[in-house]
Image (spheres, helix red, strand yellow):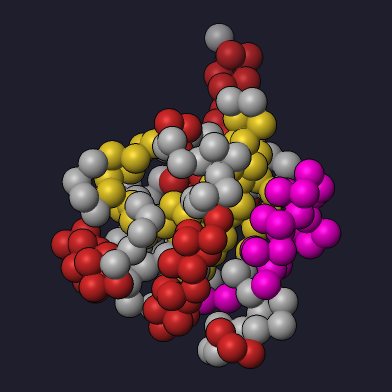
């Protein structure tokens, strides 16, 4: 009996550690089902536009960094959706700590900006923890491999959040181009720059 308890405890610790650390490139992304701003639930594994993969971006309404990237995220969806890599945006913030990121405000923001992609609400704050997202925006580029989605790039969209016209390195776009050419990205990880995610259970660094 004691041996079984020890084994279960070890497994629980292992799972907790894995989720706390989040994904690394090469990991298989688990499915999620979250509520979109249109009231419908979207599942990663059954989202039809994700024929070759998906651009999962943790973002929000209020963060200046997230706002600065909104138009670029729309452009990414416009360019890569037809190529099988649509954007799936997820708001991970707790609306009590960040009222501007409530589901109701998400609906308003999506209409104002004419979002062409799903904007999902991580109401339980479980999905962002599994992914290991730290900031808004934080990108996870997934490639479809059979029935699985494999993480191929993690990090920032590009190297200049302040000025889209001054961007030199388009990290995310370059990673997608590599995948479309049948190659792994030369750069598969960068540091995400943005606001910390507002979690109801603890304050993130």
Q: Quadrant of residue 16?
A: top right
Q: Quadrant of residue 157?
A: bottom right
Q: Is residue 75 at all visible to an observer of this figure?
A: yes
Residue placed at 50% from the left, 52% from the top? Answer: 81
Position in image of residue 136 (x %, y %): 47, 69
Position in image of residue 95 (x %, y %): 25, 64
Residue placed at 71% from the left, 83% from the top? Answer: 168
Q: Nearer the viewer, residue 65 or 131?
A: 65
Residue placed at 30% from the left, 72% from the top? Answer: 113
Location of the N terminus by quadrant is top right
Q: Nearer the viewer, residue 94 or 50?
A: 50
Residue 194 is a magenta residue: yes
Q: Quadrant of residue 4?
A: top right
Position in image of residue 101 (x %, y %): 27, 68
Q: Which residues are magenta?
A: 170-195
Relative vertical location of residue 109 with respect to residue 129 in this rendering, above or below: below
Question: Which residue is farthest left?
Answer: 104
Q: Is residue 203 left or right of residue 107?
A: right
Residue placed at 24% from the left, 54% from the top? Answer: 37
Q: Is residue 186 left or right of residue 84?
A: right
Q: Is residue 16 at all visible to an observer of this figure?
A: no
């Amino acid at each position: 009996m004691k041996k079984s308890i020890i084994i279960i405890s070890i497994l629980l610790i292992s799972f907790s550690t894995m989720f706390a650390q989040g994904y690394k490139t090469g990991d298989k992304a688990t499915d999620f089902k979250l509520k979109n701003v249109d009231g419908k639930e979207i599942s990663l594994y059954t989202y039809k536009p994700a024929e070759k993969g998906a651009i999962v971006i943790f973002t929000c309404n209020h963060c200046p960094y997230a706002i600065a990237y909104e138009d670029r995220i729309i452009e990414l969806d416009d360019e890569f959706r037809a190529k099988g890599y649509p954007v799936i945006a997820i708001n991970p913030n707790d609306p009590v700590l960040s009222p501007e990121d409530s589901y109701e405000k998400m609906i308003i923001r999506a209409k104002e900006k004419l979002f062409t992609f799903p904007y999902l609400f991580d109401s339980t704050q479980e999905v962002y923890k599994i992914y290991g997202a730290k900031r808004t925006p934080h990108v996870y580029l997934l490639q479809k491999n059979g029935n699985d989605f494999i993480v191929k790039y993690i990090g920032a969209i590009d190297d200049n959040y302040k000025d889209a016209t001054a961007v030199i390195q388009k990290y995310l776009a370059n990673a997608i181009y590599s995948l479309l050419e049948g190659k792994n990205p030369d750069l598969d990880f960068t540091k995400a720059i943005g606001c910390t995610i507002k979690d109801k259970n603890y304050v993130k660094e």
